Image (spheres, rainbow, N blue to C red):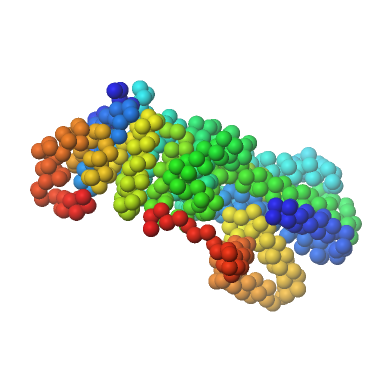
Amino acid sequence: MVRLKAGLWAVAFLVFALFPTVVKNPAFMTIAVYTLVYMACATSWNMFSGYSGYVALGSAAFFGTGAYTMALFSVHLHMAGGAAMFWLVPVGGLVAMVAAVFVGLVALRVRRHTFVVITIAIFFVFQLAAINMSYTGGSSGLTLPYVPWLISYFDVPFYYVALGILIVAVVLSSLVRRSRFGLQLLAIRDDEDRALGLGVKVFPVKLTGFVLSSFTIGMAGALYAMFQGSIYPQFAFDPIFDISVALMAFFGGFGTLLGPLIGALILESLQQYLTLTFSNGSLYLILEGSLLLFVILFMPQGIVVYIQQWWTKRALRAEMATPSGGAVAAPGVSS
Amino acid sequence: MTTLLSAQSVSKSFGGVQALRDCSLSVQKGSITGLIGPNGSGKTTLFNVITGYVKPDVGTVNFDGNDITNNRPDKVFALGVGRTFQLTRIFARISVLENMLVATQRDESWLRGLTRSKSSKGELESAMEGLDFVGLSRLASLPAGSLSYGQRKLLELAYVLVAGPEVILLDEPAGGVNLTLVNLIADKIRALNKEGKTFVIVEHNMEFVMRLCTSVTVMHQGTDLVSGSPAEVRADPLVLDAYLGGGDDPDDEAEQSDD
């Protein structure tokens, strides 16, 4: 089973790594870059919110921080447009982490619905700051150094950097899941006060998770700014982003490693594709809305969890059907 | 006998309700101390004050010679005071074994948790031993949320024990579970006490308390009324009045039907 899983991950990696060699159409490549960016962000978001149960709806604050880091550094350092700008991607991640420390120190003092509202409020503070400060270019935004690559080739470097960010996000999320730290986050999700009473230092643990998850989101934001070539406050700090990453994680499977990947892969690629195809009629909204409704109605825990449960049930049924087998009954200590 | 855990003159109000009023409790090392009293007499609040979940208005809590008043719950646990809750609290969406692992290192820094796996070999062994002790090892891989109420009580007892606290505060360990399980829990407590663990038990089941405890403190309206051996407490006229006997407290009837 472990080998099978490792094999599937390897196959998935190869498919993503070889994708640009097969698909040459720039329109599809652009969709692929956005999809990878969202897969990375949904995975990072889930690494904190999914594991700890603290549903943050302000991740765009870190995405935007990464984007503005890329824009401000490249503009003010008078960088020549080109591959050297990719060095600013990890810088964007680090600056986002610093921002997350301050946001976390405030927001993580409250729980549940209050936490959700506080994260939204803080997100708008970031957006307003970007609009009103002079050196961010205000509402007219910033134009980054021009990257002089051919259209046919333009998306490819971005694709591989995005893939790199995605791999960082998946590896980080999987390491957290296996670590004692991850176990503590899961304990906090189930009962924070009880965890505290069993020696879990809940505040530092929550803050660390929050800051770690902002790292890849900040990197993704930096890449996005370079990919776009120009940024505006309302797109770098986009409330739709806040909701999208959460939605993708819920859609695929909140709190699972695979869920946000599947959710973002389906939702982002579908949305981009439908926008491209039916942009005039807003028909894509109807199609996407129906898909969301379907999943919410029939798979409320997300696609991945639904399939897992279906698989377990099937295996159990097969076991019951064999004459010698039969599921091990739970010992009735209290019955 | 030395005093291991004590609360001195603790008072606590929630708005207009005075939950604790100059309340003191002294727990001897190696004892099983019962804490009884009518509903609303402040037993659980006293537990909350001792374990750091509630800050007292006045008064101090001492453990093993240290003042632990106002310490956070994780600190209190790290020092060696474990507790269970009246309404059993387990981590429902992680496995039974993982529940045990959460508590294995009571004094580890949070940074260490980032760099190490969920459990070392030794921790895994002691977690499995703990599950064996309460008879749940067969269910180790199931999500804890699928356990029955009684099994949850046992799991909560087991995971408090896994970090090896010196004193364990049990809030109604026999509440809402059947007789067989009550006896099982009593046996476990007795066995652990023989190994040197100190217990403080809040319980309404008088038979359970009287048979198990080496000393009993009776609480009434937020203050400690009487302390002594079970026999002394049972014979004390004050206790009979306030708790076991007649009077006009509507709680009394409920308590007696529990016996």
Along the line of sight, which residue is nearer the eye, A179 or A276? A179
Figure check: B21 above or below A23: above
Identify which residue is drawn at 50% across, 40% down.
B129
The picture places residue B90, in percent across and down from the top left corner, at: 44, 49
Image-based side of A27 in relation to A256, left or right: right
When the figure is inspected, residue A82 is found, relative to residue B146, above or below; the finding is above
The quadrant in which the C terminus of chain A is found is bottom left
Can see residue B98? yes
User: Outermost residue, front direction?
Assistant: A324
For image coordinates 71% across by 68% down, the residue present is A270
Question: Based on the displayed image, in which of its 4 quarters is residue B41 positioned?
Answer: top left
For image coordinates 62% across by 37% down, the residue present is: B116
Q: Is residue A163 left or right of residue A307?
A: right
Residue B42 at least partly seen: no
Vertical placement of residue A49 versus B163, above or below: below
* Rendering coords of residue A191 (x, y %): 46, 48
Q: What residue do we see at 64% from left, 54% from top?
A: A257
Residue nearest the viewer, comparing A115 with A191: A191
If the image is split into quadrants, where does the N terminus of chain A sit? bottom right
